Image (tube, rainbow, N blue to C red):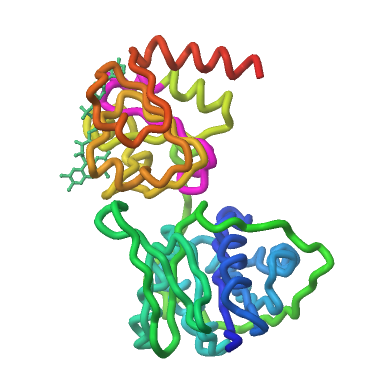
């Protein structure tokens, strides 16, 4: 049975995040011959419509209010709820990102519908959508089917291939008016101060160089940053490194930090506690550098290097520079 799928585009600094295209790929998997609608918020909305169409959107609903240029819970909640009520989809996909994790449950709760969070895959079986999501901190996966009603799902970045764009595709564009007056908004973003740690987006990075307490100081992250720069990678961290004050908590990966699924995860001086593994064990290739051969991280690593990270990491950097 065909399904009408709505995808909320995740936009940062006026650009589409890759998870939006991955969500459209997921929509193509489940829609059969149903319509795929993408919703895009903020004043750059119209500029992004072509890319959304190239990746499978049949229709693009824009809400162009500039109050939506930066994410705020109030404004996105109001706009997203209105779009869902207007579009009346069977299933709604957002990224499992700060935006999707905040707005989807709110709208789902307000509309009294179900939500499956943090999906790593979606597929069709006998006309029903089957959602796969990790449980027990990533040690197992569960498949879920929602028997009736509209369902929201948040999709973990880097798990579903966005596929190649079809530049011949076009979409119908509809502008929806949403009245976002200052009376209805309780928060107003006046200024965004970017952290110096911001480089490659951690949750969408293809390669992550991650440091643990073994880096021993804030300066100890420098060789990791150098390796990351050569590889075009993001820098991440264990909570041990964050708690020790070596880096910002924005870098924390794990159960209470970010969940990442890069193609390559290089863990430097990280012991491999279960709470850290919960955030990175689904990485496609894991390289561990640790001077303790008994460190648990080696149990999940595809490649292990027993050695001092301050010797090994600069050697890797030099070798990758030659490529
Ligand atoms: P350590 O366990 O101290 O390991 C340091 C490692 O570095 C050791 O294996 C050591 O052999 C190695 N090493 C030292 N020097 C060198 C060197 N020169 N070269 C190479 N190797 C070296 N942790 C997370 O990471 N993310 C989370 O989200 C998270 N959430 C948590 C939630 C809860 C409720 C709790 C209770 C804990 C959580 N933790 C989390 C903490 C977790 O249990 C561990 O304490 C933490 O992951 C340890 O960090 P670490 O591996 O950097 O430090």
Q: Check the image and name the residue furthest to the front.
A: 126
- Residue displayed at 58% across by 32% down: 232
Closest to the observer: 192 or 206?
A: 206
- Report x, y in % for residue 100: 44, 65
- Asked whether residue 65 appears in the rendered view, the answer is no
Q: Is residue 76 magenta?
A: no
Q: Quick check: which quadrant has ligand 1?
A: top left
Whether 167 is drawn above or below 299: the answer is below
The answer to whether residue 233 shows anywhere in this view is: yes
Q: Quadrant of residue 242?
A: top left
Q: Quadrant of the C terminus?
A: top right
Residue at figure coordinates x 28%, y 21% from the top left:
214
Instruction: Look at the image and say whether residue 212 sits in the magenta stretch.
Output: yes
Could you tell me which residue is drawn at 57 percent across and 28 percent down?
Answer: 231
Residue 230 on image: x %, y %: 58, 24
What is the x, y in percent for residue 305? Answer: 38, 19
| Residue 191 x, y percent position in the rendering | 47, 52
Magenta residues, as a range?
Answer: 199-221
Which residue is depicted at the point 31% across and 40% down?
A: 249
Q: Quadrant of the N terminus?
A: bottom right
The quarter of the displayed image where residue 65 is located: bottom right
């Amino acid at each position: 049975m065909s399904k009408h799928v709505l995808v909320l585009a995740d936009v940062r600094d006026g650009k589409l995040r890759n998870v939006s295209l991955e969500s459209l790929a997921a929509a193509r998997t489940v829609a059969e011959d149903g319509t795929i609608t993408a919703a895009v918020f903020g004043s750059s909305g119209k500029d992004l419509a072509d890319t959304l169409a190239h990746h499978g959107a049949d229709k693009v609903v824009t809400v162009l209010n500039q109050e939506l240029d930066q994410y705020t819970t109030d404004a996105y909640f109001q706009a997203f709820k209105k779009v869902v009520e207007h579009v009346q989809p069977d299933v709604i996909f957002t990224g499992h990102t700060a935006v999707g994790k905040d707005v989807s449950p709110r709208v789902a709760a307000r509309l009294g519908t179900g939500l499956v969070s943090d999906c790593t895959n979606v597929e069709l079986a006998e006309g029903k959508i089957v959602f796969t999501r990790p449980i027990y901190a990533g040690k197992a996966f569960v498949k879920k089917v929602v028997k009736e009603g509209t369902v929201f799902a948040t999709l973990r970045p880097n798990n579903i291939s966005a596929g190649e764009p079809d530049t011949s595709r076009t979409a119908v564009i509809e502008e929806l008016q949403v009245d976002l007056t200052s009376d209805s908004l309780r928060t107003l973003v006046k200024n965004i101060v970017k952290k110096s740690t911001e480089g490659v987006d951690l949750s969408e990075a293809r390669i992550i160089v991650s440091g643990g307490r073994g880096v021993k100081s804030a300066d100890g992250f420098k060789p990791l940053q150098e390796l990351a720069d050569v590889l075009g990678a993001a820098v991440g961290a264990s909570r041990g490194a964050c708690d020790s004050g070596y880096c910002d908590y924005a870098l924390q990966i794990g159960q209470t930090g970010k969940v990442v699924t890069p193609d390559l995860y290089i863990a430097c001086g990280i012991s491999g506690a279960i709470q850290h593994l919960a955030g990175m064990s689904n990485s496609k290739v894991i390289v561990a550098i640790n001077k303790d051969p008994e460190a648990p991280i080696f149990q999940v690593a595809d490649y292990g290097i027993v050695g001092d990270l301050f010797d090994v990491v600069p050697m890797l950097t030099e070798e990758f520079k030659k490529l």
